[in-house]
């Protein structure tokens, strides 16, 4: 899998809005550990200092004068299967770590104990200053915590962890109606023809959108046609109710929406986007209004589905898409 594939197809499991936290560090003298997973892009503020020195937007330890190296522990928002990471040293130039590695574990609680078994998922890797390091991960285990080692010390602006939420479906009743597309239920983005202002992964994020930037929004379309996106349910199921929320989108909401769906049993996502235009109709073309929740019943009974194509006409922004239904056996 290419780095573009894992950043586009999977969600950031280290996002605070999913419940992720930086729960431990050996040292964060210069910059607080919590900034490592800040959802905003890192910034550099010229001339900004605090009591300990230059203010930096990330996690930064002091200069180590003893043997060893620094590390921090991130508790993921949900257990997940990791497909790639981004170790981002942007704005750290003379103070970045020369190398880093990542370990993972499964632990119930916040801070893993000394007897916890850790597994290396990213071997010691050379880092450059002021750079993003996109590293693919091949690990089928659903992990709960990551330990980022930096050698020997220094600063990292952000850690992004791209993967798929793991849900133990044996704990849910097949008669229970749930949002089968929710991130916490394993829903994930596959592809969008355009994500100029907002990414598709926002459609399935928890809760209401917080502003116009917290949704999927395309550029202004100046050519014929319409914009669209493909998403995967967390579990195959039958849809009973559809919610399309245009919260905060007022002068830029789509005029209409429709949904297509399919039941696909394949090992990977290759070719799905190209074939999605041929999928069955789940929701016929319906009008939308600004800054509002729209609830629809499916207009076609097509049974169990695994993937959905969302068509918006002609372009614009949608805050959330909820697909309520019952999971298949």
Image (cartoon, grey):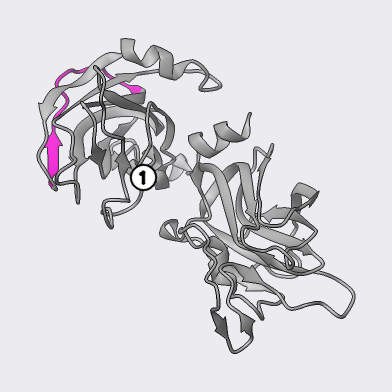
Image vertical order of residue 186 relative to residue 304, above or below: below
Residue at which label 1 appears: 202
Image vertical order of residue 13 relative to residue 260, above or below: below
Would residue 177 be seen by someone viewing this image from the given angle?
no
Q: Mark 1 packing: few (<14 Cα in 10 Å), some, or many (20+)?
A: many
Residue 139 position by quadrant: top right
For residue 44, side relative to residue 255 (left or right): right
Q: Return the residue nearer the eye: 8 or 30.
A: 30
Asked if residue 225 lies in the magenta stretch, the reply is no
Please give the name of the residue rendered at 48% of the width and 56% of the height, measured from the top-left corner: 15
Question: Among all residues in the image, which is located at the extreme top?
Answer: 278
Residue 293 position by quadrant: top left
Residue 316 position by quadrant: top left
Q: Quadrant of the C terminus?
A: top left
Q: Which residues are magenta?
A: 292-305
Number of numbered markers: 1
Residue 113 percent location from the top left of the image: 70, 70
SS assignment at label 1:
helix
Question: Among all residues in the image, which is located at the extreme right?
Answer: 67
Residue 147 percent location from the top left of the image: 69, 60
Please give the name of the residue rendered at 54% of the width and 50% of the height, measured from the top-left corner: 79
Residue 60 percent location from the top left of the image: 66, 72
Q: Return the residue nearer the eye: 293 or 142.
A: 293
Question: Among all residues in the image, which is located at the extreme bottom?
Answer: 51
Asked if residue 295 lies in the magenta stretch, the reply is yes
Residue 24 percent location from the top left of the image: 64, 72
For residue 27, side relative to residue 183 (left or right): right
Q: Quadrant of the N terminus?
A: top right
């Amino acid at each position: 899998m290419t780095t573009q594939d894992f950043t586009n197809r999977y969600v950031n499991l280290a996002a605070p809005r999913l419940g992720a936290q930086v729960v431990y560090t050996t040292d964060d003298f210069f910059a607080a550990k919590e900034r490592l997973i800040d959802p905003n892009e890192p910034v550099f503020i010229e001339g900004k200092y605090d009591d300990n020195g230059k203010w930096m937007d990330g996690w930064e330890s002091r200069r180590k004068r003893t043997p060893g190296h620094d590390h921090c522990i991130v508790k993921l928002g949900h257990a997940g299967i990791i497909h790639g990471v981004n170790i981002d040293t942007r704005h750290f130039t003379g103070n970045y770590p020369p190398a880093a590695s990542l370990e993972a574990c499964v632990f119930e609680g916040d801070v893993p104990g000394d007897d916890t078994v850790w597994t290396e998922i990213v071997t010691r890797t050379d880092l450059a200053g002021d750079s993003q390091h996109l590293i693919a991960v091949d690990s089928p285990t659903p992990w709960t915590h990551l330990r980022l080692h930096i050698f020997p010390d220094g600063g990292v602006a952000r850690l992004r962890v791209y993967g798929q939420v793991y849900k133990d479906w044996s704990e849910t009743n097949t008669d229970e109606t749930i949002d089968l597309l929710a991130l916490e239920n394993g829903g994930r983005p596959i592809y969008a023809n355009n994500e100029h202002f907002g990414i598709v992964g926002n459609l399935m994020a928890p809760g209401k959108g917080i502003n116009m930037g917290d949704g999927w929004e395309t550029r202004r379309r100046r050519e014929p046609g319409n914009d669209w996106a493909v998403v995967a349910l967390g579990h195959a199921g039958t849809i009973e109710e559809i919610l399309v929320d245009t919260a905060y989108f007022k002068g830029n909401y789509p005029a209409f929406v429709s949904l297509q769906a399919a039941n696909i049993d394949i090992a990977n996502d290759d070719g799905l986007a190209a074939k999605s235009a041929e999928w069955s109709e789940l929701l016929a073309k319906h009008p939308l209004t600004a800054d509002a929740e729209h609830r629809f019943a499916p207009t076609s009974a097509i049974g169990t589905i695994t993937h959905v194509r969302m068509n918006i006409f002609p372009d614009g922004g949608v805050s959330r898409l909820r697909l309520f239904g019952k999971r298949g056996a």
